[in-house]
Amino acid sequence: MKSGEVEQEEFKVNIPFEYNLGMIILKVNISGEEYDFLLDTGAPNVISKELAQKYALSNIFERKFGDSQGQTSDLEMIKLDEISIGGINFLNTGAAVADLKQSKEVGCLQIDGLIGSNLMRKAVWKFDYENQIITISNSVASLNISESSEKIPFLTQITGTPIIDITLNDVKEKNVVVDLGSNGDIWLSKKTFNKLVDTDPAISRAVSFSSSSSGLYGIGAKDSVHHALISNISFGDVALKNTVVEFTNESASTIGTNYFKNYDLIINWFDKEIIVTKKKEYDNSSLTSYGFSFNNKNDRLIVGGIYTNSSADHAGLKINDIILKIDTKKYGVLTADQWCNIIENGLFNEEKSTITVIVLRQNEELTFHLEKTKLL
């Protein structure tokens, strides 16, 4: 995880990237052929089983890896002699070999691998989300840094993944992963939530029971998920007001792309420093919902989670109800393309205040009229 070097001594390149499901996809070159990789600071390099077989990459050893949902698997580790990004050649870096189709959600990305922090730590990376440009450089001095920028110190895990401390009101959570492989906001542990409630029993909060998030190995285990409106959040120089944070036991504590995309972002592994320059205001100050989330179970669209005290909860909608129809849109057995379209575009017309949902439960069709309500 610490091996590898960059062939060029001095370099600075700008490369475009694409968004897919709210995450960064970039082009890489292996042995003269181009592939699509997900950029994921929360993981080491990963290549698909198909690529490992194509290039006859034999494993050096096996290591247990966890995904964002806390699920683990033993993966083969191989050495990539060379992988090129924007003409910059990264040599002798480690990579895990994984089945990237194991998770339906990761399969939607149609990627050949992940560029992880064990490679990224060999350079300075700048992300211009507004123009979808990544700058890779050997020196932070080569980058234009605004006087209004804010700095966040970080430590690293063995994989090179940046971890930071976050303070919520007067409660601190350590080792929060800076995870550009997550399209989420701020997701923290239930231990921190319990401390916040002990400190302020009147804190504004909502709860659901669900497994609505997915990692490399699939959907996370069912768990109660808490959301709380936090008055003051700080990490490094950054200060946020009135921000909704999600708390759960199963997933890792992370801060994801849905937060960082509001900034020009520089990750400087040499000085262990993140630099952010605000481009637009990050606003996650409320939580509104029809009261349920969705999942894919055996290629059927199902109710994945229910918010307590929501219209779905009061109406009697239940987890694992099979969704047959939402307003005029019917759902049968889902193809892979249909599921990917749902993940990308969602189920709901967010402008509507009410929806009608028809579900199948124990061979009986049930109809529910649900209102969008503000939970926080």
Image (cartoon, helix red, strand yellow):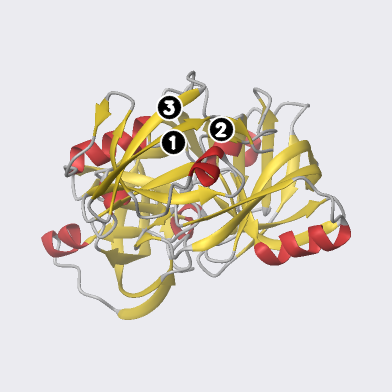
Tag 3 residue: 355
Amino acid at circle 1: Gly
Residue 266 horizontal/vertical position (percent): 61, 39
Determine the residue positioned at 46% across, 51% down.
305
Q: Does the rendering let one see residue 15?
A: yes
Residue found 65% across the figure and 62% down from its top: 189
- Is there CB contact under 8 Å for labels 2 and 1? yes
Three-letter residue code for mark 2: Lys
Furthest residue toward bottom: 61
Disc on res. 22: 1
Label 1 element class: loop
Q: Say few, some or many: other residues with alpha carbon within 10 Å of mark 3 (under 14 / 14 to 19 / 20 or more).
A: some
Residue at image point 78% right, 45% down: 233
- Residue 112, image x, y percentages: 24, 50
Marked residue nearer the N-terminal end (2 or 1)? 1
Q: Residue at 18% across / 40% down in the picture? A: 332
Give yes or no for contact between labels 1 and 3 (Cβ–Cβ under 8 Å).
no
Is the residue 221 above or below the residue 278 in the image?
A: below
In this rendering, the label closer to the viewer, 1 or 3: 3
Q: Quadrant of the C terminus?
A: top right
Which quadrant of the structure image shows residue 279? top right
